[in-house]
Image: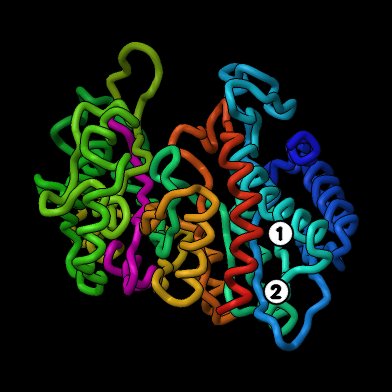
Amino acid sequence: MQSQLDDLFSFLRFPSISTAPEHASDVLECGQWLKLKLTGMGLSVKLHETPGHPVVVARNEHKEDRKTVLIYGHYDVQPVDPIELWDIPPFEPVLKDGRIWGRGSTDNKGQMMAHVLGVEKTLKEQGELPVNLIFLFEGEEEIGSPNLVPFIEANKSELACDIIAVSDTGMVARGVPTMGYGLRGITCCEVTVKGPSCDLHSGCYGGAVANPATAVARLVATLHDAEGNIAIEGFYDDVKPLENWEREMWAQIPGVSDQDMIDQTGAPAVFGEPTYSTAERLWARPTAEVNGIGGGYQGEGSKTVLPAEAMAKFSFRLVPNQDPSDISEKVKTHLEKHAPAGVTVEVEVGHDGKPYYSDPNSVYGKAGQIALEKAFGKQPVLIREGGSIPIIKDMQDILGADSLLLGLALPDCQIHAPNENFWVENFEAGIEMNAILLKELAMV
């Protein structure tokens, strides 16, 4: 494993933070390093410029009688703040206690490199791959992949494939191989509640004009009923119902019980739609969440002010059959309808992404399950992911191919947080899983 760990450590040392302009050259250098690595494996590689960060595409020699597999990943990473909470310099990776520590170790460089090294292993042992391979690696996932959809649309024929494999998701628990077949979509908005033309003295004017801070709190409270059901009219109309087999399987999956959720989050209790389990609420039910709320004086001590305006930021996670545009309109209508008297409400719609769903028991899904079972020595569980990766749905729509979500991350990998880490055992299993996956897909 030493040479494989050396490759990953070299990859991790690039501070490829896509959101920070001062790291643009680091992202480029990381993409160039990746191109050299893939070229050294005997693949044909191009580093494509975009209006932002580059896209790296690599392929073997394609033959007409073979299946075409596209493997997607991203080489950009999240910022490292707050830096003081790291136990190591985030771009000086170390191996300790069976884990690889460093920014990007799990999201997504470690998982992505497992596929790269799995392909390298097969090429060294067999001399060729059993499938037509396309690697598609971007440097902008952490900022919403703004240039990838136009790139895919412009290169649709070159990226045509039968199935897509992605390892940018998670496992439910250590030693439990996990295949995802769904992702929640998302739509976001920000509401600004305005009252008087400027901040007012709360003694001179309190009780005579509406307080925007109070109004925004009341508005937020209209999103749910007391049990956690979303109260926006028509919000649930198009939700895809859970299948019986899903409810039965998810009831047996470790790591997602009520107590597990309490232990993982530190919350005093679980909360949500009362007729659904924690797993069901996470993976197959939509949400309405307040991501930020504010207005008025925030400093130390008191300032008896009636603020001129207040705000709240919302995100709505969506499930199959829900459309972000439709939900955005329903949310906007709801917020405007429930605006308290004495204030005005302005709603600004933000970014969105469609939910993703595929059949986990298709011939490709079965191949993915076999690869996970052989690599981890245990039958995988099938889940829908609670998070959103909008590009997965975009690729399904543009390329007409489903994705196998073969996550290698664990709940304690601290993705996007200080001290991000990746279990070595999962890195090794991911390399093995890739080699098996390509063989199984070749036989479909």
Which of 47/25 is in front?
47
Residue count near mark 1 (Cα–Cα under 10 Å), binned few <14, some 14–19, many ≥20? many
Most extreme residue toward the top is: 301
Side (left or right) of 443 relative to 15: left
**Proximity of marks 1 and 2: CB atoms separated by less than 8 Å:** no
Q: Quadrant of the C terminus?
A: bottom right
Residue where numbered disc 2 is placed: 131
- Of badges 1 and 2, the one in the foreground is 2
How far separated are the C-alphas under marks 1 and 2? Answer: 18 Å
Q: Nearer the viewer, residue 377 or 88?
A: 377
Q: Which numbered tag is attached to residue 95? A: none
**Residue flagged by tag 1: what amino acid is it?**
Phe
Helix, strand or loop status at disc 2: loop
Stretch of the chain drawn in magenta? 306-331
Residue 235 in view: no
- Residue 331 lies left or right of residue 90; in this view the side is left
N-terminal-most mark, 1 or 2: 2
From the image, tell me which residue sits under label 1: 137
Instruction: Evaluate whether residue 188 shows in this view.
Output: yes
In the foreground, 246 or 369: 369
Q: Secondary structure at mark 1?
A: strand
In this view, which residue lies farthest toward the bottom? Answer: 64
* Residue 104 figure quarter: top right
Position in image of residue 218 (x %, y %): 18, 43
Mark 2 residue crowding within 10 angstroms, few (<14) / some (14–19) / many (20+): many
Give the answer, above or below, for where 314 lies relative to 148.
above
Residue 216 rendering spot, x and y as whole percentages? 26, 43
Does the segment drawn in magenta span residue 393?
no
Question: What residue lies at 28% left-to-right and 58% top-to-bottom?
Answer: 286
Tell me the kind of residue under disc 2.
Answer: Val
Asked whether, in this view, residue 132 is left or right of residue 142, the answer is right
Q: How is the image coloured?
A: rainbow
